[in-house]
Image: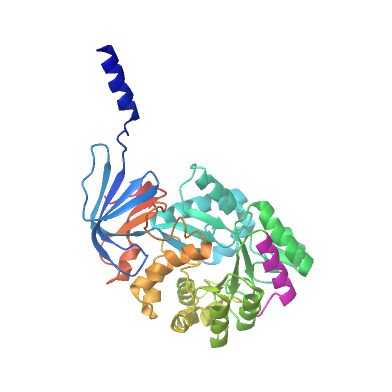
Amino acid sequence: MLKLKHSLLCIALLLPTAHAETIIHAGKLFTAEDETLHEKMSIVLDGNTIVDIKKGFIDAGDDDTVIDLSEHTVLPGLMDMHVHLSFQHEGPATYIKRFTQSNADNALSAAYYARKTLKAGFTTVRNLGDSQNETIALRNAISAGIADGPRIYTTGKSIATTGGHADPTNGMRADLQGDPGPKEGVVDGVVEARKAVRQRYKDGADLIKITATGGVLSVAKSGQNPQFMTDELDAIVSTAKDYDMTVAVHAHGEEGMRRAILAGVDSIEHGTYMSASVMELMKERGTYYVPTILAGDFVAKKAEIQGFFPDIVRPKAAAIGPLIQDTFARAYAAGVRIAFGTDSGVSPHGENAQEFALMVEAGMPEAEALISATRTTAELLKISDTLGTISKGKLADIIAVEGDPLKDITVMESVAFVMKDGRVFHSPD
């Protein structure tokens, strides 16, 4: 009898034990693998990984957890390729904060805006410029599980030329300007350009961001002049590639865009004065376009308010802002690869999804707009093997909205459920 019990115990130890899974019942499912909206689907998770997707609402085992989203549309976690988490434009006082706020203040602001961004359904972002590497620290804190927010890919401080957009001393009186250099993200010449990239690598940045032309909100006259020479751009791109870093490029003017694309950068941000020839060059070189229509819409409206922007900024905002949506429409019609991005921080954080309506208004179908913020953004980040679609083997970044976004894209502005890396951060009341 003892031998029999021992044998049964040995068999029991060899048999597979019951394994608890999480099952999401999705009323509608947009996987982003294609433009189809599937009805009544089940997504099976093992920890933070999608292990199966089945038709119908499958039964759960005794130890399984069911998340009922049967009245919702379920989608992959959204990705915004252009945010500034430690900054939010709030009118005239914004320009004073660089003198009154410390890096600790910026870091706390970034943590607050990161939570808002995640709750809005954006589980991954590219942070394209901060003040003192506060978003590198925030990225590390989120990765370590001691702060909540989206998965962050950050450039740290952007790279500019002396007096260029992202020179942090623009607008200061002479005795305060000093002479910022590569460490502060200000370069002149090939040697300093290479050093600035290497400094970003040393700081722990994920990618490089340069300001190839003038900008709207910087306290400087031009919003579109080219601000890097071709040898400087070549040095930045070749050095970045040595460190396996991509290069994102702020650019409004045509010549600055052309120089950057020919140098081999990965994405053009804003692209306001993009010509048909530049669009063809982007297609030829595989350069992504991150439109940030929402930022253009925001600054154009605020330019109508006397005193909201400094006098040197207001005409740039009034002229450039209204053009971005038209540029987007032409770029989409031309077949340029478009990755979703908002420049949130210029507009309020947490309102990122308003970009979808502006994209659809300009002629992009709803399904393509959603793919631009999921599958295409994952391709730009080179993380398609783990994120971007709801597919077997990928990480469980999953959101849900009420209604049908293929019929009314504005439902994306009110996200009811957010899961990042298998953990639920927001759920229906």
Q: Position of residue 5 (x, y in %)?
A: 27, 17
Q: Considering only vertical position in the picture, is 157 above or below 5?
A: below
Magenta stretch, main secondary structure class? helix
Q: Position of residue 399 (x, y in %)?
A: 35, 56
Number of marks present in the image shown: 0
Q: Considering only vertical position in the picture, is 162 above or below 77?
A: below
Residue visible at 43% across and 69% down?
A: 372
Q: Is residue 6 left or right of residue 306?
A: left
Residue sitting nearer the eye, 251 or 264 = 264
Q: Is residue 364 visible?
A: yes
Quadrant of the image for the N terminus? top left
Q: Quadrant of residue 181?
A: bottom right
Residue visible at 34% across and 64% down?
A: 412
Q: Considering only vertical position in the picture, is 222 above or below 403?
A: below
* Residue placed furthest toward the bottom: 276
* Residue placed furthest toward the top: 2
Q: Which residues are magenta?
A: 225-242
Residue visible at 47% across and 60% down?
A: 384
Residue sitting nearer the eye, 258 or 219 = 258
Q: Quadrant of residue 47?
A: top left
Q: Position of residue 423 (x, y in %)?
A: 38, 46
Is residue 333 located in the magenta-colored stretch of the structure?
no
Q: Is residue 295 left or right of residue 390?
A: right
Q: Is residue 229 visible?
A: no
Q: Considering only vertical position in the picture, is 239 above or below 262?
A: above
Q: Quadrant of residue 79?
A: bottom left
Residue visible at 38% across and 68% down?
A: 370
Q: How does the figure colour the protein chain or chains?
A: rainbow
